[in-house]
Amino acid sequence: MRETITYLEMTSPDDLVPARPAPVTMEPAGPSLVRDLSLRVGTPHQWPSSTWTDEQWAEHLSRPHHSWALTTTEPAGLARYAVEGDDVEITSFGLLPEWIGRGIGGHALTLTIRKAWTLTPGARRVWLHTSTLDHPHALPNYQKRGLRPYRTEAR
């Protein structure tokens, strides 16, 4: 199956278009929760991490990342970031399958983007990529929140 990757960015926190509030918060997530949530969120969308070995997970989790569980009454999703210079990449964002369609995705993304802007002083941009293998609402949600496509590639 052909896959299209879309890269999106936001160059000012003022560009964020918040979604309507929903009962979602962000809580720091440790390595075991990150792995669990990544697998549960990513497997339906064929995230590369879905097939990693224990050694690949250990290497990945040893790198500096900022990891947060998106939480309602229980963990409902994941937000992870990598900071490089004055760029913040949202490396993972998604909801668990059982939380999709419950009206929390827009607000969860709003919180995720707000957090991204706080991770490094003087951040110049927040960016991420999505794929046609991701949930069909992913790209529209990113664009509704103010992220703009700047590159696409086909695989």
Image (cartoon, rainbow, N blue to C red):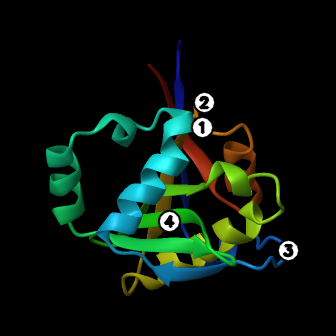
Picture residue at 67% right of the left edge, 46% below the top = 138
Could you tell me residue 111's position as x and y percent?
Answer: 63, 76
Residue behind mark 4: 79
Q: Which quadrant holds residue 102?
A: bottom right
- Checking the image for residue 74, the label placed there is none
Residue at 52 percent across and 63 percent down: it is 78
Q: Distance between the residues labelled 3 and 4?
A: 19 Å
Task: State the residue position of label 2.
Answer: 132
| SS label for mark 3 | loop
Q: Are marks 1 and 2 in contact (CB under 8 Å)?
A: yes
**Image location (x, y in percent) of residue 84:** 27, 66
Q: Which amino acid does label 2 sit on?
A: Thr
Q: Residue furthest top?
A: 1
Q: Are marks 4 and 2 in contact (CB under 8 Å)?
A: no
> At numbered mark 1, what does the secondary structure look like: helix, strand or loop?
loop
- Judging depth in this view, the residue of 144 and 101 nearest the camera is 101
Q: Which mark is residue 134?
A: 1
Q: Which of 93 and 86 is in front in this view?
A: 93
Q: Which of marks 3 and 4 is nearer the N terminus?
A: 3
**Mark 1 residue type:** Asp
Position of residue 12 measured from the top left corner of the image (x, y, whole percent): 57, 73
Amino acid type, label 3: Arg
Q: Which amino acid does label 4 sit on?
A: Ala
Name the residue that disc number 3 marks. Answer: 20
> How far apart, in angstroms, are the residues tagged by discs 4 and 1?
15 Å
Instruction: State which tag comes first along the sequence, 4 or 2.
Output: 4
Query: Around disc 3, counting alpha carbons within 10 Å, would you say few (fewer than 14), some (14 to 19), or many (20 or more)?
Result: few
